[in-house]
Image (cartoon, helix red, strand yellow):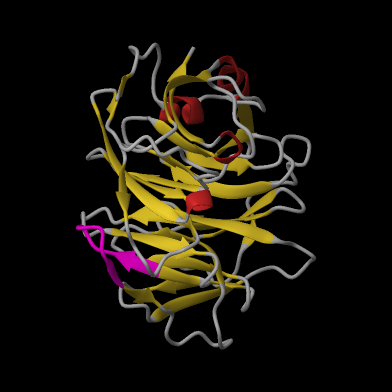
Amino acid sequence: MTTRSTRTAAALAALLAAGGARAQSLALKPEVALYQDAKESPLKAPEGVACRDDGAVVVADSGNGRLLRLTWKDGVLSAATELKVAQVTAPSDVQLDETGAGFLVLDRKAKRIARVDPAGAFASWLDPKGATRGSVVPVGFAVAPGGAVVVLDAAGSAVLVLDPDGAVRRQLPLPRDGAVFTAVAVAANGTVYVVDAIAARIWSAPKDATAFKPFTESLKGYMNFPAHLVTTARGVVAVDQNGSGLVVVGQDGSYLGRQLGMGWSAGSVYYPGQICVTGGGDVFVADRGNNRIQVFSAAR
């Protein structure tokens, strides 16, 4: 258990609200890091982390083929408890249900999304029903306000919007211009975002759109291989996996700044995976290459 130091600045939302010069003047301040569970078993290449405003946190400890649950309250990160979910052997992305009804986890080996109940037990597979292109291979997903699940389908080259029971409500084709899409995110207003890792470009589709349009220009000058996305009230944050950092983009698609950097000391990351941001502005990063989860706040 570790106590976080006093914050020295506003949350990440303030960074996203800033213009380019001001965004560059802010930095994410490392607060705590999780290296092991309650039994002192070390984390190994964690790819996923999900957090909720009530303090719930779930980690996909991918290298160990397990899930961990802990809490974050008043700057204190509790000891992590292992969840034994026999059906999920290769966990990667995780998403918490905002209603408290458990969480979802992508198993990369099974190529399926599992539902885990609040007690930490396997509940069911979330298998899409009604996709027009046959079998679905999810490579990423996000949970939208209201409980819809937005799935990035590699097999069908599309994004599927599912109701909580898995029925396809909406299907958005992905652009076919040599792009490799690696992540999907959904904003509070229903806008869906995807990122092309090859061109380092983010695309978007508003709530009622039938196709994606470019949201940014190519950001190759700022990121190498974006592999995850998260939205906030002020914009989008992309995880630059190979460049070991975060890239902040405003609501208009403009580049606002880059945070973090490659390394092993506190505050640096090495091949980061999924991130999540709480309403209070705490930023959790699955620091895969460093075998840890880091928590940050925004500092001047």
Give the left or right position of residue 247, taking residue 105 as reference: right
Q: Give left or right: position of 210 versus 143.
A: right
Above or below: residue 283 compared with residue 108: above
Q: How many marks?
A: 0
Q: Position of residue 206 (x, y in %)?
A: 49, 60
User: Is any part of residue 242 visible from this angle?
Assistant: yes
Quadrant of the image occupied by residue 183 = bottom right
Residue 270 lies in the magenta-colored region: no
In the image, residue 165 lies at what x, y percent? 31, 77
Query: Residue drawn 73% across and 41% down?
Result: 219
Front one among 84 and 75: 84
Task: Please say if 1 is above or below 118.
Answer: above
**Where, by quadrant of the figure, is residue 27 drawn?**
top right
Q: Residue at x 31, y 39 (%)?
A: 80
Q: Which residues are magenta?
A: 114-123
Horizontal and vertical percent for residue 237? 54, 40
Residue pictured at 38% horizontal, 59% vertical: 143
In the image, residue 218 above or below residue 181:
above
Of residue 72 and residue 152, the one placed in the foreground of this image is 72
- Point out the image quarter for the N terminus: top left
Which x, y percent locates residue 33?
A: 43, 27
Query: Is residue 251 in view from this perspective?
Result: no
